[in-house]
Image (cartoon, rainbow, N blue to C red):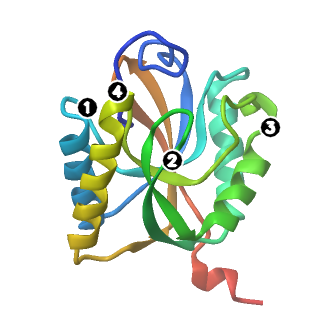
Amino acid sequence: MLCSGKGVAPGSATSLVGQFALVSYIPEPLAGFLDRLRLELTPGCKPHAHVTVLPPRPLEGELKETIQCLAAHCRDAASFTVRLGEVEVFPVSNVIYVNLCFGNDELRSMYRELNSGSLCCPERFPYHPHITIGQHLSPEDVGDAAALARKRWAEYRGPREFQVETLTFVQQVAPEMWVDLAELPLMAAVLAGVR
């Protein structure tokens, strides 16, 4: 489930109800650390650490056909590694996030290929692969929250990378409630190297 904020502004939890997204969930123990950090920065959210491949969007076609199309694409896409970088802040939205220092090219390529057909949607912001750890903060709180996030990230001693082997197609069914509709495995990295 994706973590959403409060309010009714565009991009908020309420305005996204009924929309769909494609994500890669982050495995443990990294996911647990990121979820705890997100709760510390934005208490009350319901985190499930992930990297977004397709941001929330309406679905213009049939759900079953869309899932079949996504599954076919995923079967042809090799699994890949994502490595996390540093804590940063998007300047316009004040979203606190962990940047990616490896895996960006694969995520951008998937985004370009999949942002088409029934899932084609203009984005509010240009696609930028990242892991959100804080959002919907007041402008005066962002600096302190980002400093705390950087401190916690520097103290973290666990893995800072993971393998993307499965994507999950999700739908928001209520404010702050996303459900998994389909797990879509990628072609194994080993198979990708076989000629």
Q: Is residue 48 visible?
A: no
Secondary-structure class at tag 4: loop
Q: Circle 1 is placed at which residue position?
A: 45
The kind of residue tagged 3 is Ser
Secondary-structure class at tag 2: strand
The one nearer the camera, 34 or 175, is: 34
Q: Circle 4 is placed at which residue position?
A: 138
Residue 128: % across, % down: 63, 50
Secondary-structure class at tag 3: loop
Q: To which quarter of the image does residue 40 belong?
A: top left
Please name the residue shown 65% across and 57% down the image: 74
Q: Which mark is residue 116?
A: 3
Q: Is residue 66 visible?
A: yes
Residue 65: % across, % down: 70, 33
Please state which of the two labelled residues, at mark 1 or mark 3, is closer to the viewer: 1
Image quarter in which the N terminus is found: top left
Q: Residues within 10 Å of mark 4 (few under 14, many from 20)?
A: few
Q: Circle 2 is placed at which residue position?
A: 23
Residue 96: % across, % down: 41, 46
The kind of residue tagged 1 is Cys
Secondary-structure class at tag 1: loop
Report how far apart the C-alphas of labels 3 and 4 lie in the structure: 35 Å
Report how far apart the C-alphas of labels 4 and 2 lie in the structure: 27 Å
